[in-house]
Image: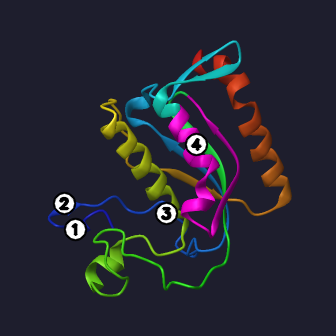
Amino acid sequence: MPDEKFQEKYRIATTRATWHDYRCGTYFVTICTKDKEHYFGEIADCKMLFTDIGEYANEQMKNITEHYPYAEIPLWVVMPNHIHAIVIIRDNNDASHCRDVARNISTGKNIQMSSISPKCNTLSVVIRGVKSAITKFANENSIPFAWQHLYYDHIIRDSNEMNHIAEYIENNVAEWDGIEND
């Protein structure tokens, strides 16, 4: 609803599939920097040349399972102003290790915050964690940086979609000149 408010501020309605809980599945995700700023590096001669924060972002994607054992990112690309990734969330009903993201308390202790914060073992928790870790790195190293508030996700439904998306990710750096000049 467009008139919905939280703490006297209007909220943007979700773009997520309301029929899906995002606890298990395979997703194509795009996370963008604020105002499409090239924080992660530049592309020259069909190669991504990382800045320090771009290198850190790449490492975060590579090591995602260390932080989220139920998640895997088998394919990703860090571009100058965004990240594309295939994210797999495995079925994991063990919520004993979960924390309420907003208040860092056990899920269920604060009913209002639990109802609006990302649910344990979901795609949104992984994306929030990645964005938070990269922002923290930037802040600790006095690197100017900001994310676009939302992110794009698409539920991958079959192997044809998976193959098409994988090809897109793999060719993204090589296609950059054509994209940027359009």
Closest to the camera, between mark 1 and mark 4, is 4
**Contact, mark 1 vs mark 2 (Cβ under 8 Å):** yes
Q: Nearer the viewer, residue 14 or 111?
A: 111
Q: Is residue 140 left or right of residue 171?
A: left
Element type where label 1 sits in the image:
strand
User: Which residue appears at 46% of the width and 25% of the height?
Assistant: 38
Q: Which residue is mark 2?
A: 9
In the image, what residue type sits under mark 3?
Ser
Q: Is residue 136 left or right of residue 131?
A: left
Q: Which residue is mark 1?
A: 6
Q: Nearer the viewer, residue 89 or 148?
A: 89
* Quarter placement of the N terminus: bottom left
In the image, what residue type sits under mark 4?
Glu
Closest to the camera, between mark 3 and mark 2, is 3
Q: Quadrant of residue 101?
A: bottom left
Task: Rate crowding at label 2 as few (under 14), some (14 to 19) or many (20 or more) other CA atoms within 10 Å.
Answer: few
